[in-house]
Image: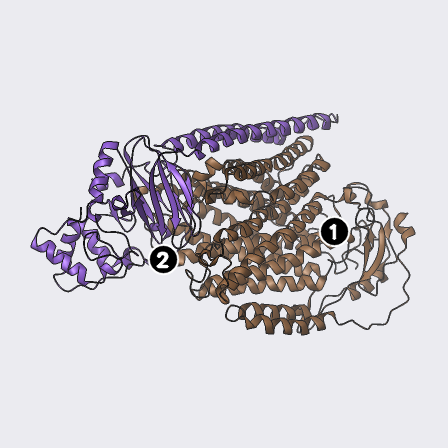
Amino acid sequence: MNVMEGTPYALPGATREHEELTRTWAPASGLLRWFRQVDHLIIGRRFIITAFIWFALGGLLAGLMRLQLAVPENTVLSNDQYNQVFTVHGITMMFLFAVPIMEAMAVFIIPLMIGTRALAFPRANAYAYYMLLFGGMMVYTALFLNMAPDAGWFNYPPLSGPAFSAGKRVDIWAELVNFTEISALTVAVEIIVTIFRQRAPGMSINRMPLYVWAMLVTSFMIVFAMPAVMVASNFIGLDRLVGTHFFNAAEGGDALLWQHLFWFFGHPEVYIIFIPALGMVSSIVSVFCRRPVFGYTAMVLSLVATAFIGFGLWVHDMFATGLPQSGESFFTAASMMIAIPSGVQIFCWIATIWLGKPSFRPPFLFVVGFIAIFVIGGLSGVMVASVPLDLQLHDTFFVVAHLHYVLIGGSLFPLLGAVFYWFPKMTGRMMNERAGHVSFWLVFAGFNLTFFPMHKLGLIGMPRRIYTYLPETGWGPLNLLSTAGAGVLALGMLVYFGNALVSMRRGALAGADPWGGATLEWATASPPPAYKFLHLPVVHGREPLWEGPENAPVVTGVSTKKREVLITRTLDAEPDHLYVYPGPTVWPFLAAVTTGSMLVAGLFTPWAFAIGTAALLVFMTGWFWPTTKKKEGEAPPNEGAAAA
Amino acid sequence: MTLAMLSGRGIQSALEPAGEHAERIASLWDVFLGVSAVVYVLVIAFLFLALFRRRREDSADRSRSAFLAVSISTVLTTLVLFGLLVSSIVTGRRLAQMPAHALSVTVTGRQWWWQVDYESADPSKRVTSANELTIPAGVPVRVQLQSSDVVHSFWVPNLHGKQDLIPGHENAILLEASRPGVYRGQCAEFCGYQHAKMALWVNVLDPKDYERWIAAERATSRIPATPEQRKGQEIFMSSPCPLCHNIQGTDASGRTGPDLTHIASRRSIAAATLPNNRGNLAGWILDPQHVKPGSFMPPMVLEQGELEPLLTYLESLR
């Protein structure tokens, strides 16, 4: 039985193609298969699960902090433990969860959505996954050994420098940045190339789904933002390991240099997390309102504008450092300006809902929750963009509230909606709707209970990153309320992920297209076969599945005996050439082990980098050793069929 | 009296301004809060209308009116943001004005306490104190901010916003309290183990009281008057205390810990962590790592009968 029977782009009676493609694209088998996979669905699923495991651990740490702060002078955690816990919570959520999960979702969905059989650079993708896995393992091992980073996720020198942070804690921060940024940059490049060169014929750049646009923009932001933090982390690593003085004012260095480098990454980072979520929201709004998102061009321009402006406001995290007035005004203006494209998108979604017929299924509920919460985060963002207000609000619990409204409201809510929405594509089964509703309301109520009181706490003087406070401060009741809210939030998360775990085994079978989706990922079986599409689709509009795919042409002539992928041109997606992708291989795993060992050994000696680079050269040679399979006489792709 | 002060609410709050700068910021806050509330209500109202409006069966294309609505909303957003930007910049400029004549105080951030130096053109009138900033009401005070170790941030929310203390950089903040009172400030930039217990008291005095206070501070420490105090001073001088602490007019001239010349006149010990009374002082001297783990104050090992005279001596340093 052919799993593709009845999907839109599968020509009937293609049993031979199905069998050959299944053989050609077969995942790795045998004892070592776990280490050899390169398929984007397999790696994508692992990526998603791993990122959610880091999320759960980061959430537990947040729970510990809430317990500690529930009442004044609490003793759940010591000051030393608290500092490690809040630091690891921050780096987990920012480095190990937020960016990886957004990339992981794209690794899984993007190739399907643009109608291709593989992600570009499949081996690099596997390598990127292992780097994330090893990085997280390193940090949590360190946490259990009581040697986790404790100078904050922002890791400001001189506190993080050799004089004030002895031991290896801060070095682990620096190496974690290397692990995660290598991973993030690798995936970003894969996504850019996949989107630019592998779109289905006919999917010209002005027909790309908004989610694809969002991931394209995000990936470019990653490429420009991440190198800044890698430079910073390696500078601090050098200061600590070999005694350079990049950040040591006493020797001509500058502590503020760090803040510029870090926030030049750190502020775009927020948008790197947020923009993919905007793409998810557009996908969900469109499907559950049964109409295309209103204002496609405005939406795309808003995404691009957000990315550009996102690089022009890093100083707004540094208003209290005593920079010149006129400079600060510029960054205030930029920070407020970024609210305009966000506003445009909110207005366009509301217009879409207005014009469409909304159905309140869980993914859509999460999107409505997103709007209700994110707008608060956006407005408090305008407040902290103002220099005078920021002087009061900066580094207080007001900012803790603001950033969680933006990141949980702006990113996690759409993500939870998107996981619910794409869950059938990933597992072949539906998540339970009733449990979905329950989890939404628990998460929504718990979130607001936890974080709304923090606005007030900041205004009445509670600074961030304090492990305790005196009863006389009057911060006790609101903190207790917040901790109670965190309990509700945790319960909601448990229901949500419990639902996912149970549904993975026992959920209702989904079929290819359970939601009546518009984009190409719904044109293949759930879960998709290893070759993704029996025949590559050709598209004629922005919502291919809503435009009568039954009679749509398909591409023929792509080899079924080799892992051949159709490469199309960047702007108009006209077929350009065929390219054979590599199959399962163990080299990426070995290269990742080598890189990981080098970085971990680099905690202790600079020699690790000299030896590690040489070793890596050997493994990279193995990786790129040309395969000598004889070339078969294959016909070029049948462009006539594609254009038909 | 100290306890009564401690339990006073609103002494570390941006919402209860007691100084010119904090008042300006609070007014700007009211503007932003009001505008935000209106915007939020409008957005949510439209969202709910869109979600729950009654949908008639006619299939008239409404995307033209939607286009109009989105365009108007965008233009309005831009105008509102521009208005907020202007009000923010106007307030920012007012806050940045530095008067030509102001009292000058230097605050140095230390892990995890504040050194406070009252500057004077006459070096003999310079006063060094710690963890307590005393200023006259209605007089502009320029506070120079510097750090000798890591980045800290000086924040007394009732008087002004915060300003960072960064090694290698000179910052300053202008305070002008409008009325006498007591306020609390706290370090706002994470600075290590005891970031949470790095606070300070700000006493705003009537200008006449301030003159009396600063005159008293300029004096060297009191000479022990009773045998008990004399014994306490001997114990202090023969212990490791003078290596870190200074007591003006004695041989104790350490500079790494807070100046103790007038310790008994201060509200708190351990950087506004404990009220300054005999019991807390005893606990702090014997086991500082219990009160403030990670602090650089080592526990003192004292012989039987040494603690009481030592406390009596310290309590005499008014």
Residue A96 visible somewhere in the drawing? no
Task: Determine the secondary structure under disc 1.
Answer: helix
Residue at the outermost front position:
B122
* Above-or-below relation of B72 to A299: above
User: Which quadrant of the rendered structure holds the N terminus of chain A?
Assistant: bottom right
Gap between marks 1 and 2 measured at Cα: 49 Å
**Nearer to me, B126 or A148:** B126
Circles 1 and 2, Cβ within 8 Å, touching? The answer is no
Left or right of residue B47: residue B211: left
Figure quadrant of residue A250: bottom left
Residue B45: % across, % down: 57, 28
Chain brown in the figure, letter = A
The residue marked by circle 2 belongs to what chain? A
Q: Which mark is residue A78?
A: 2
Figure quadrant of residue A477: top left
Q: How many marks?
A: 2
**Nearer to me, A330 or A420:** A330
* Above-or-below relation of A353 to B227: above
Residue A191: % across, % down: 70, 54
Residue with the mark numbered 1: A195
Left or right of residue B181: residue A280: right
* Above-or-below relation of B258 to A170: above
Residue in view at x 71 percent, y 34 percent: A295
The residue marked by circle 1 belongs to what chain? A
Q: Amino acid at mark 1?
A: Ile
Q: Amino acid at mark 2?
A: Ser
Q: How many neighbours does mark 1 have within 10 angstroms: few (below 14), some (14-19), or many (20 or more)?
A: many
Q: Considering only order in the chain, which callout, 2 or 1, is on the residue closer to the N terminus? A: 2
Residue in view at x 86 percent, y 72 percent: A630
- Chain B painted colour: purple
